Image (spheres, rainbow, N blue to C red):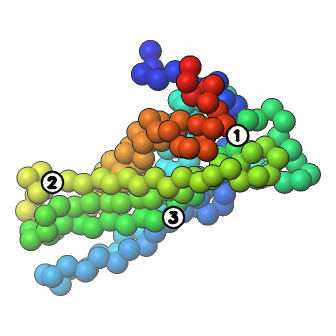
Amino acid sequence: MPLIEPLPINVGVYYGNDFRAYKKKQLNVYSQNVTSICNIQLGEANIALFDYILFNVFDNVTSIQQLPNKRHNFNNIDLIIEPTISDYAYALAERSDPEASAYITYEIRFYSPDDMQITSWTIHGEGFIPPRFQRKGPVLSRTWVVKLTQLAMREVAAQFMTDFCNQKDIQTLFHEQCNQ
């Protein structure tokens, strides 16, 4: 049994090309003359994250191939959601650093089915590993970056799931559904 009941809202979700193919190339330079380049591809993970969130928060979720416009009205959808990733970074720890961490920021835009942007919501997530759990020397492993990023994404999921109905414009539009 889920902790929250899905809201009786029909949602369309639009994943833009930048969101689907998001990748980050980061050069890491350490004091011990160790350099690494890490290519992180978050496109599939972004989609998996928001599919998980949306299918657990709403009764009905439909993937759409374009945002609404004057020619394409989505009559069977109450709200269209377009997540975008606006920032992503990570810092891998060395012995002198307090922790290893990853930060991710999503901007989520909400549209009416007839082409009007209702609001947007910025959600930040952070994943970190406290010093007591780190091994000696720099944390260079791609595995650590993935784990840190997953922690940050879980934080985003929790925020969306618990705070969706607390967004002022959402509360105004979906007062009845949010207060069941």
Cα separation between marks 3 and 2: 26 Å
- Which residue shows up at 38% across the image and 43% down it? 154
From the viewer's side, name the closer residue of 103 and 136.
103
User: Picture coordinates of residue 171 (x, y %)?
Assistant: 58, 37
Residue 142 location, quadrant: bottom left
- Which residue shows up at 20% across the image and 79% down it? 30
Which mark sits nearer the N-terminus, 2 or 1? 1
Query: Which residue is at the far right?
Result: 71
Q: Give the crowd class for mark 2: few <14, some 14-19, many >=20 residues within 10 Å.
A: few
- Name the residue beneath numbered marker 1: 79
Closest to the camera, between mark 3 and mark 2, is 3
- Dot 3: what SS? strand
- Which residue shows up at 86% across the image and 44% down it? 73
Number of marks: 3
User: Picture coordinates of residue 76 (x, y %)?
Assistant: 81, 32
Note whether residue 154 is visible.
Answer: yes
Q: Amino acid at mark 2?
A: Pro
- Name the residue beneath numbered marker 3: 86
Q: Give the crowd class for mark 3: few <14, some 14-19, many >=20 residues within 10 Å.
A: some
- Which residue shows up at 56% across the image and 19% down it? 180
Closest to the camera, between mark 2 and mark 1, is 1
Note whether residue 62 is visible.
Answer: no
Which mark sits nearer the N-terminus, 1 or 3? 1
Q: Is residue 45 left or right of residue 16?
A: left
- Name the residue beneath numbered marker 2: 130
Query: Which residue is at the far bottom?
Result: 33
Q: Would you say the residues marked 3 and 2 are in contact, meaning their CB atoms lie under 8 Å apart?
A: no
